[in-house]
Image (tube, rainbow, N blue to C red):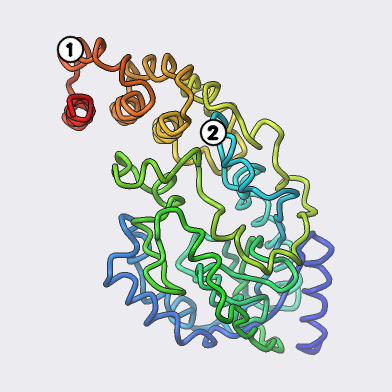
Amino acid sequence: MTPAALRSRVAERAKALGFDAVAVTTPAAIPQAAPRLARALADGHHATMGWLADRAEWRGDPVALWPEARSVVMLAMNYGPDHDPRATLGRRENAAISVYAQGDDYHEVIKGRLKQVAGALAAAGAEIKVFVDTAPVMEKPLAEAAGLGWQGKHTNLVSREFGSWLFLGAIFTTAELPADAPEADHCGSCRACLDACPTDAFPAPYRLDARRCISYLTIEHAGPIPHEFRAAIGNRIYGCDDCLAACPWNKFAQAGREARLSARDELRAPPLAALAALDDAGFRRLFAKSPVKRIGRDRFIRNVAVAIGNSGAPELAPTLATLLGDPSPLVRGAAVWALARLDRARLAPLAARAQAAERDASVRLEWDAALAREAA
């Protein structure tokens, strides 16, 4: 089989398995990736995500990751929403969950199908390695090099056909396949994504400081959310779609076709009060197939408590009062802040008893700060 014929077979199988776009590049096609990564790491923009620094030499250079690879097949699956996700931000007593996390975990959906696509290469005698966001591979620069789109000023991939809503997967192979031309940058002078960020997480176009990013703060950050960002988080309890949704190229986007990636009704805009009542078993049951499950119940309820504090709905204060007795200090601390913000009159009567029983230093600090604001 000729390289061109093999490439066509791979593309046909990918489309038959539900991928919306497929293209090919080479492992040496992203020389700019390593210096950009080095700069981000040097500036601390990776925050506590030490895995970005681990094996940075592999992450920045696919040739170093697997010297025998000759081609990289990049595949994309559209998960475009059927509505503007920013509409949920106005429903303050309901939770805003990032579009990508409202359906099944994309890792589980995509990886098995990538292996099936790669089977066409293996059948032709080529070696393969399959990656879906779980290895030191920079998928977005590779997707740009393959022509699937370009990295916009928000650092995510933008497609002229699908806007900002694409999941990516990569197949490294020893087969030499015809490579596609890279996509040009079509952002121009637009800065809609940068201006949409609630926490000013972009120090410059094409640069993201994760320490200020709501997606990082609500997903990757393990401790208490810094006070300076809590109000700006609003009702976003898992991720943030603001910079993606603001992109003008989304006018060409279309709703995703893959049923398993579609939003479940119970995750479109669930009531904050119902989520706050979840114990560990209830959390695991609700998010059994969702990427949300990986942050665990305590971190999730921390986010819910912050969102309730931002709701402006005093009728939710009893929910926060209940969370003051939660087994997790992470949850208790967030509940203190939220109750002080939502219903100051309810806070003082609870303070003396709660502080006397509190053993966690971080939660005591939350009480001290809340009461100081009350006194002021």
* For residue 131, above or below residue 361: below
Along the line of sight, the residue nearer the viewer: 179 or 234: 234
Task: Say what amino acid the circle numbered 1 marks.
Answer: Ala
Few, some or many residues within 10 Å of mark 2 (<14, 14–19, 20+): many
Residue at point 68% right, 72% down? 159
* For residue 335, above or below residue 154: above
**In which quadrant of the rendered image does the N terminus lie?**
bottom right
Q: Identify residue for label 2.
A: 92
Task: Say what amino acid the circle numbered 2 marks.
Answer: Arg
Image coordinates of residue 4 in percent, x first then y, are 79, 88
**In which quadrant of the rendered image does the C terminus lie?**
top left
Q: Relative to 354, is 161 on the left or the right?
A: right
Along the line of sight, the residue nearer the viewer: 363 or 91: 91
Q: Identify residue for label 1.
A: 352
Element marked by disc 1: helix
Task: Determine the image quadrant of residue 218.
Answer: top left
Residue 305 has which mark? none
Few, some or many residues within 10 Å of mark 1 (<14, 14–19, 20+): few
Image coordinates of residue 177 in percent, x first then y, are 70, 86
Residue at point 68% right, 62% down? 114
Residue at point 52% right, 87% down? 28
Task: Determine the image quadrant of residue 173.
Answer: bottom right
Task: Choose the circle earlier in sequence order: 2 or 1.
Answer: 2
Residue at point 44% right, 17% down? 319
Query: How many angstroms separate mark 2 from mark 1 (CA)?
Result: 30 Å
* For residue 162, above or below residue 146: above
* For residue 290, above or below residue 173: above
Along the line of sight, the residue nearer the viewer: 137 or 262: 262
Q: Nearer the viewer, mark 2 or mark 1?
A: 2
Image coordinates of residue 165 in percent, x first then y, are 66, 60
Q: Relative to 196, is 184 on the left or the right?
A: right
Image coordinates of residue 326 in percent, x first then y, are 35, 19
